[in-house]
Image (spheres, rainbow, N blue to C red):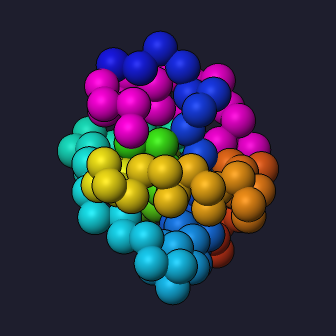
Amino acid sequence: MSATTEDLIILTHAEFVRFKQDVKEAGIDLCYAAEIGEPIRLDWSLQLLRDPVFQEALERRRPADASFRIASVRHTKKGGWFRPDQFKLTFYTVSALQEDALQQYLTEHHVQSSSQAPREMLGLR
């Protein structure tokens, strides 16, 4: 597993959907996905993506292949009185032939991790 999330771009589900469409229009295909089976269980907060518990869980679940640099966070189950919310992580990458094009796109468009995680951006209705 990766020891750091510094090189990882973490996006809310809504931001990822928009990002995926934008890179597709630029001719880049995020053709590889690694969906993590074990969800992250944590109480939702606007600062979820910066929560140390979330960051630690993200690091443990990140694929060993460092080319998976884009992560999408989706709220899959609302918490209750005795249980926390549930979040699904999916990591994405491109083929080796498109790695340079993706890096150029990320640099030119200043793509960065989401700073906050509003509920409506995480996909749960």
Query: Start and end of the magenta stretch?
Result: 46-67
- Asked if residue 89 can be seen in this view, the reply is no
The one nearer the camera, 26 or 6, is 26
What residue is rendered at 61% in x and 56% in y?
Answer: 104
- Percent from the top left, x then y, of residue 91? 38, 48
- Looking at the picture, how far across and down is residue 44, in whole percent? 62, 49
Q: Is residue 20 depicted above or below 48 in this figure?
A: below
- Image coordinates for residue 117, horizontal then vertical, percent: 69, 57
6 up-or-down from 111: above or below? above
Closer-to-camera residue (56/76)? 56
Q: Is residue 48 magenta?
A: yes
* Residue 28 belongs to the span the image colors magenta: no
Q: Is residue 90 left or right of residue 19?
A: left
| Residue plotted at (31% across, 31% down) | 65
Is any atom of residue 95 visible in this view? Answer: yes
Q: Residue furthest left?
A: 37
Numbered label tally? 0
Query: Is 77 rendered above or below residue 60?
Result: below
Residue 102, given in percent of the width and then of the height, sits at 51, 57
- Who's the residue at 70% across and 35% down the image? 50
Look at the image and tell me in which quarter the N terminus lies: top left
Most extreme residue toward the bottom, as rendered? 25
